[in-house]
Amino acid sequence: MKLVMVGSESNPFIKTGGLADVVYALSRQMAKTGEEVSVFIPLYSGVKGKLKEHEKVAECEVHMGWRREIANIYHEKFTGIDFYFLENQHYFERGTIYGYDDDGERFAFYQQAVIEALRVLNYKPDIIHVHDWQTAMIPCLIKEKKDEFFKGTKFVLTIHNPAFQGIIYRESLGDLYSLPLELYDNGALRFGEVVSTLKGGIMYADKITTVSPTHRNELLTKEGGMGLDTVLALREYDFCGFLNGIGYEEFNPETDPHIAKNYNASSFVSGKKRNKEELCNRLNLKNKNAPLFSLVSRITWQKGMSLVFAAVHELVKHGANVVLLGSGEYQSEREMDRLHMLYPDQVAVYVGYNDPLARIIYAGSDFFMMPSLFEPCGLGQMIAQRYGALPIVRRVGGLKDSVINYDGNNLETSNGFGFDEFSEWEMTRTCLYALEQYNKPEVFKRLVKNAIKTDNSWEKSGEQYHGLYRELLSR
Ligand code: GLC
């Protein structure tokens, strides 16, 4: 089958979050099973320098209201996938990839450019798989414009982050998408008093998925639906939750070149000890034998930072070390700095993103904190498990589906710690319980082994997506 993935980011070219990991890893998995896979992303500044082929292969023109904009198309084959990059300097050559007043216009352009590019390349996909609000209007555009070129093409939308809904004004439907305002007035794209492009995807895609079974069910409730519950209820039978995996070649403590000593499920005791020493040396943590709690994350309200901050004080009192890495919201970054100033020998902070350091953190820590307010899937807890750091999570979304809480009775099967209520007290209590287990070497070792052996590969979820595509094509 001819599968086209359309994203606003993808590894290994550009990444701000888990979306980039998933677009790439899922494509790779499908290519491995023998499918013909293409990935489309914008050519942001910085991406061009990473390309080996510098010649553009074609160009296309997009008409948006009074605007005429060109997209230059670049191509590169990478790990069996055809990557297409759409270049438009005005929209994409900027300091960051999101966060501009005209994001609605930028991605309206991008989506129409993808459609035009496929036409110019004369490439008719069997499946177009779109991801999040930035690409969610593609099914609507093609279906509403009754585009003959795409006759027979089926559409899948995956929701990675429902908190971002792609809000634009009613009038923008005509101005940016050349769609009739009737689609607002009849409710198809209307979301309160505005338009949501994410809702557009939900209404027009043939199948909708999100990134864990639990998050699927949460999205169908009023409390967890972020306003989308009633829309999703209309599509309940076409809506499924498949748990993400992580790239098993990419995240492998046995081969990872960034860590101090490689290890696996049988050699982890000495391997992790060595990595912990290295981490403590690099970050000036005094006691290299202390239990170590870490966090690697985008620093946002979604990730439950206030709960982490509360727990840090107690952990430090109990002699543990803490390492926090990530960037994001100003207030939380300052709080990270403050904790380091308060406890310079026990709390290390890195504000920013640094992949090699992140890997030593996974390899060198005993526990990995992730008490999210909501978490569609979460990849950090899975990487942590593979590197033998026990996740401490709030049991929501994909965290609930991937972490089995150790309750004192299930040593054979558990691979982390979990709690339910979003409270500082619950987080602190769970961290201290985890610390108690650290002091029982046989229990702790077994839990770490279970974590390392947990299957978080893409095999299973890849098969679920594959099944979904096949089902659509057999209709
Ligand atoms: C978003 C979600 C995260 C998920 C990722 C990949 O970043 O917040 O939970 O793991 O997308 O699907």
Image (tube, rainbow, N blue to C red):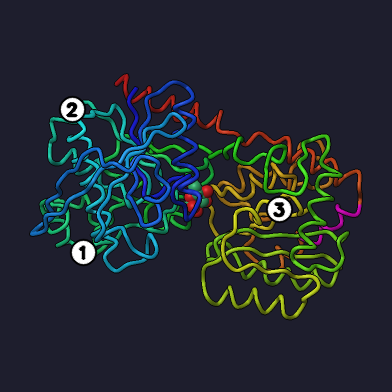
Q: Which mark is residue 169?
A: 1
Q: Residue at x 79, y 43 (%)?
A: 448
Residue 201, image x and y in percent? Answer: 30, 45
CA gap between label 1 and label 2 equals: 30 Å
**What amino acid does circle 1 point to?**
Tyr
User: Which x, y percent locates residue 339?
Assistant: 70, 76
Q: Is residue 184 above or below residue 475?
A: below
Marks 2 and 3: in contact by CB < 8 Å?
A: no
What's the residue type where badge 2 is placed? Lys
Magenta segment: 431-439
Looking at this view, name the residue that lies furthest to the left. Answer: 66
Label 2: which secondary element:
loop
Q: Which residue is mark 2?
A: 151
In terms of secondary structure, where does tag 1 sit? loop
Alpha carbons under labels 3 and 2: distance apart: 49 Å
Q: Which residue is mark 3?
A: 360
List x then y, in percent, for residue 438: 86, 53
- For label 1, the crowd category at 10 Å Cα-Cα, with few meaning under 14, some 14 to 19 and many 20 or more, is some
Is 351 placed left or right of 411 in the picture? left
